[in-house]
Amino acid sequence: MGKNKHRKFADNETFANMVQAPRADLLENGLPLKGKWHKEFFKNNKPIVLELGCGKGEYTVGLGERFPDKNFIGIDIKGARMWRGARTATDNKMDNIGFLRTHIELIHNCFAKGEVSEVWITFPDPQIKYRRRKKRLTAPDMLEMYRKVLTDDAIIHLKTDSQFLHGYTLGIVEGYGHKVLDSSYDIDRQKSDNELLKIRTNYESIFRDKGMTITYIKFQLCKLD
Ligand SMILES: C[S@@+](CC[C@H](N)C(=O)[O-])C[C@H]1O[C@@H](n2cnc3c(N)ncnc32)[C@H](O)[C@@H]1O
């Protein structure tokens, strides 16, 4: 491991806003904070918003600055990337920010039903190959797994450069009877007044430099009877 990465991992151990849990512990016992994020981590009752595959956590920090009345948790498996967001939030004394280093597939071991009010999925790998379809972060089974931690009226946002994932997600959302609240195949042309979409992630900058257009979908899961 490079020196820099080693230093970031060491820092991560010291950040009060960073939660890390070994996979085996999560599978066996669940995260000790499950169902207790409000009381024991944030020490308030403000709504909790997740950023899935947060990378450096630009949305977690950017939304945290704009919405002091909400709590934000960036989730990713790559600690060296999350270090950036955790460092910024620590330096700026932002008490509405957390980072959770784990696999997204395990979030139902980390949060209780109704603990999460909103989800941002920012530039995930589109997993285009058919054999990887269950890994897409908006695949039907993934959405049902998110439901296990969401409030009934939770909102999910997907921002991606992938026209494939955008179209796939629209198809899944409509096909499964979920509700599209907003959608754009090119946010610069159609949503240039949406302040929240102006937060720019690391991968967004990389894709924009390659001339890719950026898409967006906002939706809600259907109610279960
Ligand atoms: C393409 S990057 C996007 C990062 C960031 N959202 C951005 O826009 O710059 C995808 C991120 O998702 C994370 N990721 C992918 N699959 C994951 C999984 N199953 N669990 C946790 N993180 C995952 C990767 O580690 C990576 O940081």
Image: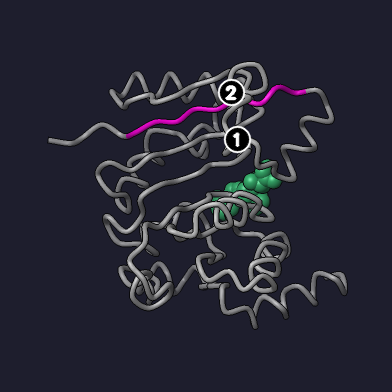
In the rendered image, the vertical position of residue 177 relative to residue 34, given as above or below: above
Q: Which label sits on residue 197?
A: 1
Residue type, numbered disc 1: Leu
The residue indicated by pointer 2 is 191
Q: Position of residue 196 (x, y in %)?
A: 57, 39
Question: Which tag, 2 or 1, sits closer to the chain's start?
Answer: 2
Residue closest to the far right: 3
Q: Position of residue 92 (x, y in %)?
A: 66, 70
Residue type, numbered disc 2: Lys
Proximity of marks 2 and 1: CB atoms separated by less than 8 Å: yes
Residue 128 belongs to magenta span: no
Residue 214 belongs to magenta span: yes
Residue in the image at 54% along x and 31% along y:
131
In the rendered image, the vertical position of residue 181 relative to residue 120, given as above or below: above
Residue closest to the far left: 225
Between 184 and 192, the residue placed more toward the observer is 192
